[in-house]
Image (cartoon, rainbow, N blue to C red):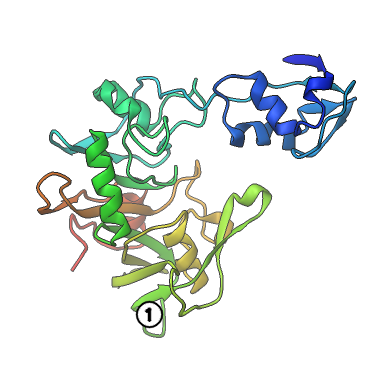
Amino acid sequence: MVAEDLEVTAALAGTRLEALVRGRFAGSSLTQVRRVIAAGDVLVNGRPQAKGYRLHEGDRVAIGRTPERADWHPAPGEVPGLLFVYEDAEVVAVAKPAGAPSAPLRAEETGTVANALVAHDAALAGIGRGPRDAGLVSRLDTGTSGLLLAARTKAAFAALLEASSRNEIAKGYLALVEGVRRTPWPSTIRRPLVPHGPRGATVVAGAEHDGSRIPETRILRTRSGTGATIVVAEIRQGMRHQVRAHLAAIGHPVLGDVERGGRPLGDGRLALHAAWIEFPHPRTGHRMKLDTPPMEPLASALLEVRLAVRKREEP
């Protein structure tokens, strides 16, 4: 099935393929247009071409899939098990269960934290870096449970981003990792993070690095159980998969992180929990600290390795 089939006129000759496709679908993002082209869903004279291909008069362009729009907002929806931890006029914090995505990838997708936030407060639909953020200042991997912070106004969102850029937002994690370390744990892991695999879907840690702008994971505390260890870690300006990649790099992958050597927990869930977040309130500037106890599957995994479940793990 072809979404659109057209012949390049003299007026369009010389146009880049990605520009032509984007121009045919109002509201589409350049990122989504490039994905459609890279997937081979756009043919020029019956053959795939690169996004930068310069069109010639008489070329026949067949667009087999419509690029997703960039101007859509998450639809209201529900996330079973989602907990509202705190809210006021500027911010709202929720604890999500493992298995729930933070934000939708498509307009028709529901069941994400962003959908639930919009259902709770429709005004959140227009707040964030992009239209699908629903005010979320940061995100968690689908398999990770725990705290997420969202801004309820554009001014609050801008203030929290500024605070993050100044390293004033701290996020704490509980991670149950493979193995019991026989040598002292490092107090800090500083390694660059490199996208790996198809479309960079997996992030891995590079060699140790002392340069600037290298993501840093602080190890605050550990407790050993039967063949596994609970690690209490803290990050400031977190990057995608940072805690998982850093712990795997020192030989202790998170349980459930099978891509990096962790034993499976089922349904892609991880024994990783965002346990607390500390930040300056965007209106008052006063520091706030919100926390939430371990959720599944971390809570059950802790008992299996004979580690007591504690509401508060940080020092």
Disc 1 designates what residue? 186
User: How many numbered discs?
Assistant: 1
Q: Position of residue 262 (x, y in %)?
A: 51, 60
Q: Nearer the viewer, residue 211 or 179?
A: 211
Q: Is residue 248 left or right of residue 231?
A: right
Q: Nearer the viewer, residue 291 or 206?
A: 206
Q: Position of residue 255 (x, y in %)?
A: 45, 58
- Determine the residue located farthest toward the front in the rendered image: 11
Q: Nearer the viewer, residue 92 or 268?
A: 92
Q: Is residue 175 left or right of residue 279?
A: right
- Determine the residue located farthest toward the bottom in the rendered image: 183
Q: Position of residue 309 (x, y in %)?
A: 24, 56
Residue 2 in view (yes/no) = no
Q: Up-down: is 65 above or below 227?
A: above
Q: Residue at point 28% right, 44% down?
A: 158
Q: Quadrant of the C terminus?
A: bottom left
Q: Residue at point 43% right, 68% down?
A: 213
Q: Quadrant of the N terminus?
A: top right
